[in-house]
Amino acid sequence: MEIYHGSNICVDKPKILTNGHYKDFGYGFYCTSFEHQAQKWALTRKKEHIVNIYSYTEDKSLNICSFSKMTDEWLDFVVNCRSGKEHNYDIVEGPMADDTIWDYIEDYVAGNISKEAFWVLVKFKYPTHQIVFCTERAIKTLQYERSYSL
């Protein structure tokens, strides 16, 4: 399977990032199966805009959490990760909560909207996908292929 990572540099040796703000699925190396999504990620970077391409070979022995769509379990997981709670998965995969979605999540957590209202507000006009490599063991399933500039 080919996957993509948008950046401002060529990332031929992926690393797990454990700094900065908390993300949807916690700390890790974020990729996507959608090339156009990686291009959007790259364009948010200053200076260079680079899409890195990897081949990914699934390892069934890894502890993988996969969300095929946004569900109550996905919402709880994202809220926990964005709040700094850690998990024990090697890889987490599923839809992403972009900045608009995150505003709704904050409203839900604060009690300003119900869970039902949250689900009405977050209906996507386009699909998203992210796969996060959270451990060194998981990173080893990636093989760098190439990069290109936008």
Image (cartoon, grey):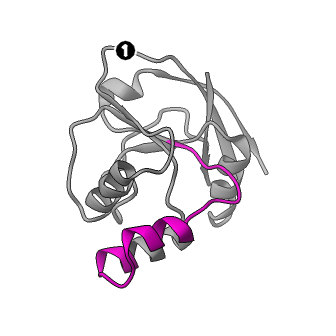
> At x 51% / y 53%, what residue is drawn?
96
Reply above or below: 60 against 82.
Answer: above
Label 1: few (<14), some (14–19) or many (≥20) C-alpha neighbours in 10 Å: few
Q: Secondary structure at mark 1?
A: loop
Say which amino acid is labelled 1: Lys
Q: Which residue is mark 1?
A: 60
**Which sits in the foreground, 122 or 9?**
122
Q: Which residues are magenta?
A: 107-130
Residue 98: image quadrant is bottom right
The one of 118 and 148 positioned closer to us in this rendering: 118
At horizontal 40% and vertical 39% (from top left) the residue drawn is: 15
Residue in front for this viewpoint, 123 or 32: 123
Q: Is residue 115 magenta?
A: yes
Label count reads 1
Give the camera-side residue of 29 and 123.
Answer: 123
In the displayed structure image, the side of residue 92 where residue 150 appears, left or right:
right
Instruction: Determine the residue located farthest toward the front in the rendered image.
Output: 116
Image coords of residue 22 (percent x, y): 33, 62
| Image location of residue 141, percent across then percent down | 44, 21
Horizontal relation, residue 130 to residue 145: left or right: left
